[in-house]
Amino acid sequence: MDTHVDLGALPVDTSAPVLVTGATGYVAGWIVKALLDAGVTVHAAVRDPGNAQKVQHLQDAADASPGKLRLFASDLLREGSYTEAMRGCRIVVHTASPFVRSVRDPQRDLVDPAVRGTRNVLRTAGEVGGVERVVLTSSVAAMIGDAEDILTYPGRTVTEDSWNTTSSLTREPYSYSKTLAELEAWRIAQEQNRWRLVTVNPGLVIGPALNSAPTSESFTIARQMASGRMRFGAPRVALTVVDVREIAYAHLAAAFLPDAEGRHLLAAESTDIVDLARRLLPAYGSYPLPRRDLPKPLAVALAPAAGLERGYLRRNIGYDLRVDTTKSRRDLGVRYRPAQASMEEMFGQVVGAGGR
Ligand code: NAP
């Protein structure tokens, strides 16, 4: 596994600590490791610093690097709980937000932590002196909801100007939570002039995890592929994918490049589930991978068994997804690796952990 995030000539500032919220997460693990490897002191805000299973990989990364790790107990829904962790930091990287698709109460389980949590972290950035930049992990989900959004975009292409207008509490509530959280972040950013907001908006993140038991929704597709749940095929819903190490690099570029500004769409390619599974055939062809697109009526009929909503598939099967990633390449210097290697490493981890 390629465990190195190549920072190239990024002007990494090691003179002040960097706060990373949600440090236990899949995406954050690679951000923390890249910072530690570069010699930065990381203030890692986590819900439970005493949970060894969730923080051991961060400690291991710190032990093997010149950077230092300090753990802080913080919760998105506990006002003021990021204050201590933010002291002395010029840069705040706010990744914490629930990334789960099946929830009982979308307002309580997704929207509240995403939006109130963003407000909590960003307000603290205004109160604790010295914060100059906040990098927010948003998502392509804040740029596009249902496929009908694309029909309204110039050139039918998703760009940094695109906003998701179709998600709601009852339609893809995770995407709704990310949209509301990013909108709230921009609203708060515009009310002040102490720190600059820069957002990273990734497509579906793929590639290996540093944490031993990742809970990120990113792993759902790989686990479903391994389990045989899709052995008769998969719905052709377009999605974009990007390797987790490129996402870590992009966060550091957004944090340290003096001129970084605005939103950044991050995607290596547009694809779909069967196309992703095809990349796994050379190495993992003995697994019950999906090998064909399910016809739309069949996919819609079988949706609940696959944990999907019928309406979601009705609205989204059969569309192409065009994205323009010029800004992330040009302004942040992101270089995208092909999805094949990322998928192989991720799938290898899933089946190695008994995920078949
Ligand atoms: P993840 O592994 O589930 O990470 C989510 C993080 O949020 C965890 O550290 C979790 O802490 C934390 N969190 C959740 N609720 C919290 C609360 N109430 N208080 C404090 N922390 C809380 O998922 P991920 O994939 O790394 O996602 C990280 C970020 O990237 C999210 O903002 C997500 O929306 C965004 N993103 C992810 C993808 C992707 O494909 N993975 C794509 C686009 C954007 P615990 O460990 O304590 O639960």
Image (cartoon, helix red, strand yellow):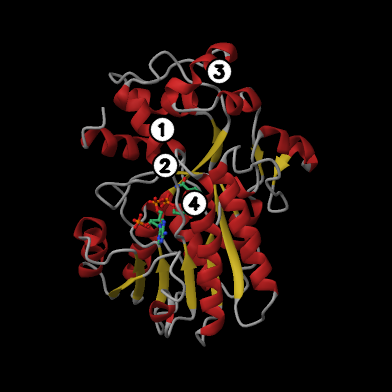
Q: Which amino acid is tagged 1?
A: Ile
Instruction: Tell me the residue that label 2 is attached to.
Output: 218
- Please state if 10 lies on the left or on the right of 161 as rendered: left
Q: Which amino acid is tagged 3?
A: Val
Task: Mark 2 and ligand 1: say if the CB distance to the nearest ligand atom is below 8 Å.
Answer: yes
Instruction: Tell me the residue that label 3 is attached to.
Output: 300
Give the residue at x 50% y 84%: 128
Instruction: Tell me the residue that label 1 is attached to.
Output: 221
> What whole-number distance in Å separates the C-alpha atoms at marks 1 and 2?
7 Å
Q: Are marks 1 and 2 in contact (CB under 8 Å)?
A: yes
Task: Mark 4 and ligand 1: say if the CB distance to the nearest ligand atom is below 8 Å.
Answer: no
Give the residue at x 50% y 71%: 121
Q: Which amino acid is tagged 2?
A: Ser
Front one among 158 and 4? 158
**Crowd around label 1: few <14 · some 14–19 · many ≥20 (10 Å):** some
Instruction: Tell me the residue that label 4 is attached to.
Output: 108
- Please state if 256 lies on the left or on the right of 326 as rendered: left
Q: Are marks 1 and 4 in contact (CB under 8 Å)?
A: no
Front one among 304 and 5? 304
**Crowd around label 2: few <14 · some 14–19 · many ≥20 (10 Å):** some
- Please state if 246 lies on the left or on the right of 254 as rendered: left
Q: Earlier along the polypeptide chain: callout 3 or callout 1?
A: 1
Q: Toward which corner of the image does residue 297 lie, by quadrant? A: top right
> What whole-number distance in Å separates the C-alpha atoms at marks 2 and 3?
22 Å
Q: Which amino acid is tagged 4?
A: Arg
Work out whether residue 9 can be spotted: no
